[in-house]
Amino acid sequence: MQPTDIHDPDYFHKVVDCQWACPAHTPVPEYIRLIADGRYADAFMINWKSNVFPGILGRTCDRPCEPACRRGRVEDEPVAICRLKRVAADFKGDVSDRMPPLTTTRNGKKIAIIGAGPASLTVARDLAPLGYHLVIFDSDKRAGGMIRSQIPKFRLPEEVIDEEVGYITAMGPEMRLGQRIDSLKAVLEEDYDAIFVGTGAPRGRDLPIPGRQDAAANIHIGIDWLSSVSFGHISKIGKRVIVLGGGNTAMDCCRSARRLGGDDVKVIVRSGFEEMKASPWEKEDAMGEDIPILNMLVPIAFIHEDAKLVGMTFDKVKAEYDARGRRNLVSTGEEPVFHACDDVLIAVGQENAFPWIERDIGITFDDRWDMPVVNETTFQATLANVFFGGDAAFGPKNIIWAVAHGHQAAISIHKFCQNEDVAVRPPPGVTIVSQKMGIHEWSYDNNVSLDLRFKVPHRDKFAALSDIKAEVELGFDLKQAFAEAQRCLNCDIQTVFDDKLCIECDACVDICPVDSISFTANGEEADLRTRLSAPATDLTQAIYVSKNLKTGRVMAKDEDVCLHCGLCAERCPTGAWDMERFLIDVAQAESACCK
Amino acid sequence: MTFIPKPKLHHPDLQKNALGLTRRDYEGPVSTLCAGCGHDSISAAIVKACFELDIEPHRVAKMSGIGCSSKTPTYFLGASHGFNSVHGRMPSVATGANLANKDLIYLGVSGDGDSASIGIGQFAHAMRRGVNMVYIVENNGVYGLTKGQFSATSDKGAKSKRGVVNSDEAIDLVGMALQLGATFVARSFSGDKGQLVPLIEAALQHKGIAFIDCLSPCVAFNNHEGSTKSFDYVREHNEALNALDVITGRPEITVDYAPGTLEMVMQHDGSVLQLRKLHQSYDVHDRVAALTYMQERAAAGEIVTGLLYVDPNPRDLHAHLKTVDKPLNALDEMALVPGARALDRINAGLR
């Protein structure tokens, strides 16, 4: 193998698995250390810079970081990264003086932002300090988009949305709320330099099976129903409720129904339990509220008597896999199953809808999905001054993806408005600094905690179910937060090796608790991976290879399960190993342009 | 020294041996020796050897004296017995312990000061009596604990860190062990676990005195230009005689040596040592030739390593003394105080 180029910013970035997995590349270990240090406002600001909605995401994020967390590979569970983010938000105090000041100097460019959801607000947050005149449109009267309309208040209190949306609206964008855009052509005819479309995936999929129209009064589309609940238009539901669908919307629907009078609420899913799209913790929370999840049942019909819904019939299926490994749900041939109910909530998916974008204005739509053709890096449409982001760009994803899209779109809009090539992306800012303080003293806590993951305390079930606005999760207290923060392995504190200093004494090999380090003859990667102290089977994890050493061997370190405990550096007699903090600051609009 | 304990977390694929223990279960607390000390590598080699041989930790007694080397038993086999004796007296204590309970595995760890200076008389007698034990000397040629004076194994002409040249002749422990009748004699290097681990395994299986002289560079006081016990010097002058594989029934350990002729050495207990000879003419069963060869190569400035001599049918102290099969500490009162009639019988035999 060639010696590893540790100066490539991606190399050490990949070692910080959580940050690499995060679409917005939030520097997770950095803010977790600040939480352990009691610096909650600093931790919050790192999050705010990177993911814009720490308090919101600390409650609702899909957490791609957690399955990636290295801790999950050396013990049972990853660090509770998401809930620690909430800790930063809960205990930060007043941070208003840390927010960017209101920009008074305008740069003369005017941007229309359609939709006031997370992607749009991110674009606004990134562009406002640069002097853009931003105009945000939304059909709802309050900004926030799906964050406000679809996420139940018992998961995300209104005040948190108000606060974090408020930081952005306070930056001076012109808010045209309650104003629905019905024609993009009309917007294009106005004097905007660029337009950002962040209108989400606003249409819930229906289930056109027999009885759908006849019993329509008691059959609701999940996201529309959630939004009506959210805005107070609906405050009760029948005693027996069936929720169709296995995603997070279905989990929000069933738990909301439990709080609005549903005593007998059940979720019925076509697929198996494991294949459900809902996050494991959301399924767990639903089942904890006495909501059974019934699997492998495909809806046949809505059954009604005198135009009133009485229940549903389902076909019992089993999964069969064809030669290509694709799953087919095949009827077991048993009698249809009947489940009585008073109401049905359909949460079987969301779709994009762009009836308001004319097809003759230069924006190409693909034939298959009728979605706009959007560049995956620049988020630019085929019409150069129109950009898409969030669910509007590539279909339904999660808030953190919308934020990441927003950052990239903001960079593109800024470059576009400054007449720069949007395809040339700004490089990240990288700093790497030794953490050595003394002979065996580091400026981070290298002692690895053996605690198992702490559970976030919940509100008493009876109290939680009797008030739809009462937040179920209470968040970690400071003692729990500290202990959970200590579980972080500090993967951003990198092991940096200097081949010129190494005397090949084996001290690092002997001390390494996870057998990461080997000194051996170099070879092709596939061969080298089998000859290390412990076989390196995870091909997604890099092998750090040094130049040739005095004996002709190389140092080869498997990054996979390194605990970043620094013992290799402590036991190194010559300082060939050092622990260095790697901070990568993914570029945002403010640093996008050369001018 | 390192202040934090070595984290208990381990590699998810860490192997278990026949006892269900992992290699980590054979470790001790984190070492307090200087970073990079060769002795820590020897400790790691002992850990690996005991793990691979499926040795029950409670069947091992770690014996040591005083010095950097003699501190190391704290840092391996945390679940074994241990005796840290006074300076240089480890061989006598080990002899006594072995006499009392021959069922334990005795692992003596000593240094060049402990064995070649203050304890040289003790060392000599353990060799000639053939105490069934492994006797490892962690040899760095320097008194590390007292800031780097030459020790008795320091080569004549070697230069100290301060630039002083050693004018005294070195004691060659390997030569002494051979002369005094040790039945297993080897020399190795802390920086070469591929060679050292199988040697320790073979020594642990040897039913007699097994002596390993292990060069172990002192990174603090004896790893400089002019030293003859530094990493660089030993690597440059290392002349490996053979490579050893101990056949334990588990997947073969690959050693980083070129293949040579194979020689199988059947041991008394049925275990097999597989020697890959790197020097065709060298015979590991010829004590006299071994002594001659050692002296020749030493004169040529080479450090000969590997298995130097082994007697496949060793006799140990208990065989010499014709003790009973049962360990003496397990003999009950009936056996120890056989009564007046037995005494009469003995007396009658002497009349």
Image (tube, coloured by chain):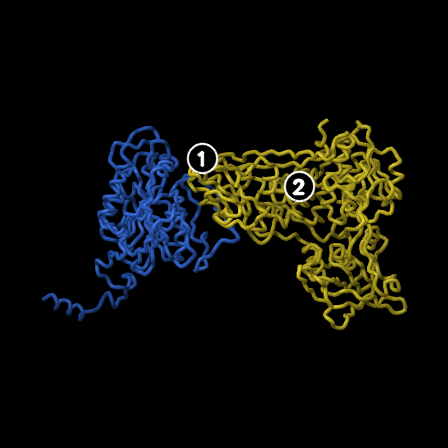
Chain colours: A yellow, B blue
Q: In what quadrant of the picture does the C terminus of chain A appear?
A: top right
Q: Return the x and y of residue B26 as percentages of the image width and height.
A: 42, 52
Q: Circle 2 is placed at which residue position?
A: A26
> Vertical placement of A458 versus A589: above or below?
below
The CA distance from mark 1 to mark 2 is: 34 Å
Question: Disc 2 sits on a residue from what chain?
Answer: A
What amino acid is found at the position of numbered circle 1 in the picture? Thr
Give the class, few, some or many, for how many residues have Cα within 10 Å of label 1's Cα (few <14, many ≥20): some
Q: Mark 1 and 2 residues: CB-CB less than 8 Å, in contact?
A: no
Please tell me which of labels 1 and 2 falls first in the chain.
Answer: 2
Q: Residue furthest bottom?
A: A335
Query: Are marks 1 and 2 in one subunit?
Result: yes
- Nearest the viewer among A313 and A355 is A355
Identify the element where label 2 is drawn: loop
What amino acid is found at the position of numbered circle 2 in the picture? Thr
Task: Name the side, left or right, on which A585 lies relative to B74.
Answer: right
Q: Residue at x 20, y 69 (%)?
A: B339
> Vertical placement of A135 versus B347: above or below?
above
Q: Return the x and y of residue B184 as percentages of the image width and height.
A: 28, 51
Q: Return the x and y of residue A304 as percentages of the image width and height.
A: 86, 68
Q: Which mark is residue A143?
A: none
Task: Name the side, left or right, on which A355 lies relative to B172.
Answer: right
Q: Circle 1 is placed at which residue position?
A: A574
Is residue B90 among the parts visible in the rendering?
no
Q: Residue at x 45, y 38 (%)?
A: A572
- Nearest the viewer among B314 and B149 is B314
Identify the element where label 1 is drawn: loop
Question: Disc 1 sits on a residue from what chain?
Answer: A
Q: Quadrant of residue A288?
A: bottom right
Give the class, few, some or many, for how many residues have Cα within 10 Å of label 2's Cα (few <14, many ≥20): many
